[in-house]
Amino acid sequence: MAVKWIEGFEDYTDVNQLPFVYVGDQFGNSSFDTGRSDYGQSLLYSGVAYAESSFSTPDLGNQGTWIVGFAFKHDVLTSISAFDILQIFDGITAQVSLNFDPLSQMFSITRGNGTVLGTGSTVIPNDSWFYVEMKVVIDSSVGTIDLNINEISDISVTGLNTKNSSNSYANFITFPHPNGYFIKYWLDDIYVLDGTGSVNNDLLGDMKVEMLRTSGEGAYTSWSSNNGNIPRWKAVQVLDTNFVSTTTNGNKGTFNFSPLQKLNSGFAAVAVNVFARNSSPSTHTVDVVLKSGATEILSTDQTIDQITYRRVQLIQETDPDTTATWTSEGINAVDCGIKLIS
């Protein structure tokens, strides 16, 4: 698999839900705003005085190549000092960082120790969306960096030392936010690749995320709604006081989804997101379920050990029923949900 993470900020109703997904978070005055394509929503990332904000993916596994794409818009005073907006970490050590300078309104890429590896020339003015993609190969002597802005190369350098830790790999991605009220920027349509596999292992170009909500019952209905007046598929539409649950190992609960409205081709992957929690202090294990036609696949086992929600994600790059690239017809026909393992 090359696609490791997808985020469009579509399935949240409050920024206080972001810690269900991301670790080490101080979201300050952040909020959700209109998405860059005038549908869905984006994250308006705003800090507070003397408190640094950041959000980091879970551990995505150790890999030497990482590709990250995201939509970016800013409203930053030119008097503000340059700051990192993206960091690629090995454990607690930043290997490579993407830096934005509000004065020049340009990007640069640095090794985690601050050494500049490359400086861009594309001006990123206030209040305009740009799609930013960075590819990094981590190595002490033959590392590479590539930065594309709106699918046009802005930085491309080879033969670098891109290793800041003792390892030639990284395992998670962070979007940091520096101290202060006066820095705010928007993020949307994020993808993360690890460079492995035969597809989706290089810069993908401008990508968009569209969320589909549940619209009906699926093939498996053994998880029950907590509210007898609300059908199962409505109980899971929004993260609130309604939910479905089961106490029986092996039970599955799946749902049909509303059809695509905005996207119709060029699909890199489908991500199935499930918010799960325990109703008691006990630890449980669940799998995310994706059923396409007669073919059913499960995620790896996911440990749920908290009584607060945690989001788990299954990413599938091809239609498992056809083994081919996803089509809109295939996506519109999927049946997805959750299985209690133990």
Image (cartoon, rainbow, N blue to C red):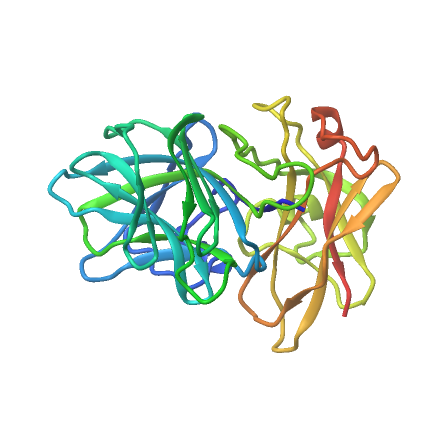
Q: Is residue 94 left or right of residue 113?
A: right
In the rendered view, tell whether residue 266 sits above or below residue 238. Answer: above
Q: How many marks?
A: 0
x and y, in percent, of residue 68 in the image: 48, 42
x and y, in percent, of residue 292 in the image: 80, 38
Q: Nearer the viewer, residue 34 or 319?
A: 319
| Location of residue 70 by image quarter | top left
Q: Is residue 182 left or right of residue 276?
A: left
Residue at left offset 62%, top offset 37%: 200
Q: Quadrant of the C terminus?
A: bottom right
Residue at left offset 52%, top offset 34%: 203
x and y, in percent, of residue 296 in the image: 83, 46
| Location of residue 163 by image quarter | bottom left
Q: Nearer the viewer, residue 149 or 44?
A: 149
Question: Residue pushed farthest left?
Answer: 79
Residue at left offset 19%, top offset 62%: 50
Q: Is residue 201 left or right of residue 129?
A: right
Residue at left offset 50%, top offset 59%: 168
Question: Residue pushed farthest right?
Answer: 294
In the rendered view, tell whether residue 191 sits above or below residue 267. Answer: below
Q: Nearer the viewer, residue 62 or 209?
A: 62
Question: Residue pushed farthest bottom?
Answer: 281
x and y, in percent, of residue 264 in the image: 63, 21
Q: Nearer the viewer, residue 181 or 70?
A: 70
